Amino acid sequence: MTDVKWHLEGKYVEYCSCDHGCPCESMAPPTRGHCTGLVAFEVDEGYFGDVRLDGVVFGATYFFPRAIHHGGGHMQPILSDQTTEEQRGAIFTILSGEGQPAGTMFNIFSIIVEHFHDPLFLPIAFEWDVKKRTCKIDIPGVARAETAPILNPVTDGEVQIRTVLPDGWVFHEAEVGSGMAKGVGDIKFDYAKRHSSLAYFAFNNNGMAYSYEEAKARYGLDKVA
């Protein structure tokens, strides 16, 4: 168990093989029975004890054979090649869920992921705009992904879907987009027009760092449109 104080906050994106809207958030099974894809984080402000984590980019490819709460998951962590040894140690300790309360994000993943693939240290391109519902991720030789607004099939107008989770464990609010993702590393996937979420995140030793009301005030969540 670690008693080192830490804090991370910044930008988050997820891609999964389900149709638009995340079934896991509404207690429904995955659209195609399994869940696979990519998550990525860009830290705007962060620390682990005396180690600053501002600007760190990290993510993971993943595969779950059923809904994620059933476990049996595979995950391959990926950290930017610009990270220092101290930053890598800090991120790995945070991702381990060590000393974190039950039901918090990294604690949950430490339980449901049963197969960890060797971590990778590579360039990670991260372009993110929550208001436009756009994102691009490029990890050479491993994965690339892109989010675009969902379009109405009749009018071609942009459709806004917002996930609101006041008691969420990953984010409080997310803008939903249409995701394309391809993984060519240990964990392989290839799909388009599937689920993608963009959100601000903030975590610390106790889980979510801000309440829903605090996050709305800090990020202007209800003003994103």
Image: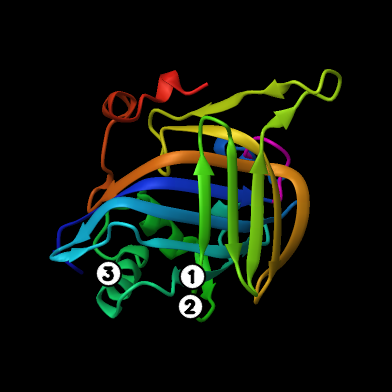
Residue at x 38%, y 32% (from the top left corner): 167
Q: Which residue is mark 2?
A: 119
C-beta proximity under 8 Å, tags 1 and 2:
yes
Q: Is residue 26 visible in this depiction of the protein?
A: no
State whether residue 3 is above or below residue 135. below
Query: Secondary structure beneath disc 2?
Result: loop
Give the magenta range: 17-22
Q: CA distance from mark 3 to mark 1?
A: 13 Å
Q: Amino acid at mark 1?
A: Pro
Indicate left or right for 94 with 143 as reference.
Answer: left
Q: Is residue 33 visible in this depiction of the protein?
A: yes
C-beta proximity under 8 Å, tags 3 and 1:
no
Q: Which residue is mark 3?
A: 90
Q: Nearer the viewer, residue 197 or 69?
A: 197
Quarter of image, res 209: top left
C-beta proximity under 8 Å, tags 2 and 3:
no
Measured as percent of width and height from the top left, residue 25 is found at 55, 37
Query: Secondary structure beneath disc 3?
Result: helix
